[in-house]
Structure formats: structure tokens, C-alpha cells
Amino acid sequence: MRQAIQNLEASKIREVANAGLGRDDVLAFWFGESDEVTPQFIRQAAIDSLARGETFYAHNLGLPELREAIAAYTSKLHPHVNADRIAVTSGGVNALMLAVQALVDAGDQVVAVTPVWPNLTAQPAILGATVRCVSLVPRSGEWTLDLDALRKAVTRDTKLLIVNAPNNPTGWTLTRAEQQAILDHCRVTGTWILADEVYERLYYEPTPNRCAPSFLDISTPDDRLVIAHSFSKSFLMTGWRLGWLVLPASMMDGVGKLIEYNTSCASVFTQRAGIEAIQRTDEVTPRVVAHLRQCRDVLVPLLQAIPGVKVAPARGGMYAFFQLEGFGDSLALAKRLVSEAGLGLAPGNAFAPEAQGWLRWCFASKDLDRLVMGVDRLKKWLAAQQEQAR
């Protein structure tokens, strides 16, 4: 097996989750998904498609109807995007991997802003690229970008810059000024930008278009820019494995070939569900965002009230990312919380070494009481640790 594959780390999030398998008493907040099922009308669209016998291959780039629907949806949020720049993918993970495959050769230099979901740094490494990480900087529980450090890291030798904002796990979101500075710099260096914007609708700051700032708002169609999206978060469709890319039109033929050699196409019945979700987005996404804001506003103050906890309200995403003073090994801490407190959280060092000592709490819970119960378990466990230390 290739050395790059052997060098890959196993998922620390999965490692923690595996430690809690078979335990009904664990309150699980480790995975990045809501515990709310996909709306019935979306599921029904897939059922109807299967009933019609739509079980065959589709176009590599996706059903024309879905590409048009995604283009129309995108154009309501951002400047107009044509359907000939949309590629439908088998999930957001697949979208990201396709983009990296299209742009990165072995030996290329890639820069990634971290902490970040580990797939984003692993994917270029799988292809043999050299990945350099530029860390966000935590201040009083809030993570911020050192723009000067990023500009120094991205040079004419940098093939690709990977940015996830709103960010998983920190909730950090790029400002418009930061986006413009990054785009201007990458235009000078000739660096491609891969912007993972799957959380753009899960944004809690007031904006006219009800979404986070996007590179699409300030770019031109021929910029070296690829945007990755997913149906998973905003439409409660994590298990459906459906996503899309917004690309320069010049890349479409090549990406179509890559899709052929990776997955051939997304399943038709899944795409029919995607069409229904996009066309009825106002029945899903605003409600999801309002509920997630409520979840955030319940959880974060409770965490902030615990002595030794550093956390700031996330501006976007579905996570509270917090630090527990006095605990250095995030993975060991997360495993202890599972076994000793019945609380399942993701370890911070799963997302970057600089997040050692931090924990990620996915607050996308239908039941707000589960969040309150989780905090109560954390407080009791911390009190027990303090008692034992006396």
C-alpha cells in the first residue's frame, strides 16, 4: 500500500464514538449532524423516483433539472451562476476530493487553514501533495485569522489554498474584507482557492441574503476558485450523500471525467430528493437555522458558566468548540467523558494539533433538554475530578 495511505491517521472522532458503541446511556454529540430526520416531502420524492423505476445511471455531472435548480438557488444568494458551472457529486466529501484530484499533483504545495475537519488536509496528502497548515488563533475562546501569516504562507509555489468557512469545528467565519484580501493575494500568486462553504446557510449574523459571506460574491466566473457544497447540513440530508461543486466552466469536462472514474454519477432517486429539497428550501432551511441558533444560545451560556471553560458563540456552523483548562490530551479526555460521564464529544486534536485540549460539541439536537443534560453531566464529572484532586 502507498506510504501516503499508511501515513493517514484513523479518525479520532470515530475512535471516541467506537468507545461508546452499545451504550444507550451515552448522550452523543460527537458527529456533525442533526438528530432530526430528513423532511417527509424530500424522502417522498426519492420514494416516488424508485417507484417509477429510476434505478439507472445518470449523467456524470448530474440531472439537468438538478443542476438548473442548484444554479437558481445559488443565484438567489449570490451573483448569477449558470448551470454549466454546476457539477453534482455523491456528497460533500466527494465534491472536495474531486476538486483536489482535479487541481493537485504529487509534490504540489497546498496550504490549509486549520483547525479544520481532517478530510480537508488528508485529501491532498493522499495525492502526494505537501500540506502546510496556517492556524487560526484562539482569543478568549474565539478563533480568528492571522491574515498576514496566511499571506506569507501562500506563495507563487502554492498550488491550492483550502479554506472552510463557516468553519468546522471552531465556528469561525471569514469577513468580506478577509475574503477580498485572500482572493486578491491568490490572484497575484496564481493559487487556486478551494472554499468549503457547506455551512454557509447555518449562519447567525444578520445578512440580507441569510447566509455567510461567500467567495462567489466577489469573484469572477474565470477566477481560480472552486466552491464545495452539500445537501447534508442545511437540508437535513447527511445520509443521502449528495453535494455539488461550483467551478469555472473550463473545468467541467475534466471534472465530468473524474466523476466517471470515481462514482460514475449520483443516484437518480437521491437527485430527485435534492430537487425537491432545493425547490422547497424555504420550508426547511430557515427553520433549521432558527432552531440551531436556539440550540447554540442554550448551550454556550451554560458552558461559559463553568469555571475553567473557554468558549465563544459560533457565528456559523453547528458546533460549540471549547477548551477545558487543565486537560491536555483531547482524545484521552473525550474517551474519559464517554466512559465516566456518559457524554460523547469530539476531541479537538482530531482537527489540528493546535486544538489539543479543546472539545467539539455538535449542538444540532431536536431536544434542547439533551443539551442541558449534557452540560449537567460535564459539570458533575468536573466536580468529581476536583474532589479527587483534594
Image (tube, rainbow, N blue to C red):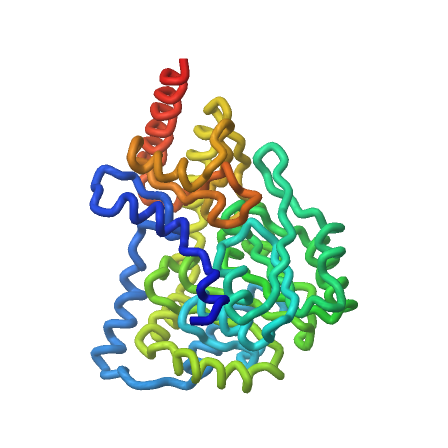
Residue plotted at (34% across, 33% down):
374
Residue 268 visible here:
yes
Q: Nearer the viewer, residue 61 or 217?
A: 61
Residue at position x 27%, y 77% in the image: 49
In this rendering, position of residue 182 left or right of residue 136: right
- The image quadrant of residue 253 is bottom right
Q: Quadrant of the C terminus?
A: top left
**Drawn side of residue 372 relative to residue 325, left or right:** left
Residue occupying the far right of the picture: 188
Q: Position of residue 219 (x, y in %)?
A: 69, 68
Quarter of the figure with residue 264? bottom left
Q: Residue furthest top?
A: 390
Q: Is residue 370 visible?
A: no
Residue 4, horizontal then vertical, whole percent: 50, 66
Q: Residue at x 37, y 16 (%)?
A: 387
Image quadrant occupied by the N terminus: bottom left
In the rendered view, tell whether residue 66 sits above or below residue 132: below
Q: Residue 112, image x and y in percent?
A: 61, 58
The residue sitting at 49% across, 34% down in the picture is 328
Identify whether 187 is placed above or below 181: below
Q: Give the x, y percent position of residue 256.
A: 49, 84
How many marks the image carries: the answer is 0
